[in-house]
Amino acid sequence: MTERRLRACGYFSAAQVTQAHVSRELQVSRQSVSRWYRQWQQGGARALAGAGRAGRKPKLNAQQLGRLAVALRQGAQAHGFDSDRWTLDRASALVKEFTGVSYHRGHVWKILRGMGLLLQRGR
């Protein structure tokens, strides 16, 4: 998106180009182009250089995720479970124990998938 915003700056500098044209060329909504144009007018290309991070900041940092990955690779029995099978409920409990952060089991699945880890079962 940064590249698109910076390309839009070039269009904005050209006097005879409409926002609708920029929208079609960059394949973005007219609302986005309008917002970018206002930002460009107020701060130039620098205002469009970086929009920053989208969404909420993660609750777990890289160090916590690393510790969690090590713990998961140790196996479920190493953490007091009766079998070595990891489930989302067990993984959720481990996240809570190691980090103090509670996540819905569905979100734990997304975190684990992002770490490249797969579980054997959902429950």
Image (tube, rainbow, N blue to C red):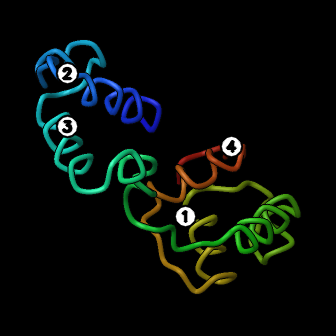
- Residue 84: horizontal and vertical position, in percent? 80, 58
Q: Earlier in the sequence, mark 1 or mark 3?
A: 3
Q: Indicate which disc residue 23 carries.
A: 2
Q: Tell me the residue that label 3 is attached to.
A: 32
Q: Earlier in the sequence, mark 4 or mark 1?
A: 1
Q: Kindly identify the residue that appears in the image at 76 percent across and 73 percent down.
A: 63
Q: Tell me the residue that label 1 is attached to.
A: 89
Q: Quadrant of residue 98?
A: bottom right
Q: Is residue 41 above or below residue 100?
A: above
Q: Nearer the viewer, mark 4 or mark 2?
A: 2
Q: Earlier in the sequence, mark 4 or mark 3?
A: 3
> Three-letter amino acid code at disc 3?
Ser
Q: Nearer the viewer, mark 4 or mark 3?
A: 3
Tag 2's secondary structure?
A: helix
- Residue 122: horizontal and vertical position, in percent? 53, 48
- Give me the C-alpha separation between circle 4 and circle 1: 13 Å
Q: Kindly identify the residue that appears in the image at 78 percent across and 61 percent down.
A: 69
> Three-letter amino acid code at disc 2?
Ser
> Three-letter amino acid code at disc 1?
Asp
Q: Is the C-beta separation of discs 2 and 3 under 8 Å? A: yes
Q: Earlier in the sequence, mark 4 or mark 2?
A: 2
> Three-letter amino acid code at disc 4?
Leu
- Give me the C-alpha separation between circle 4 and circle 2: 41 Å
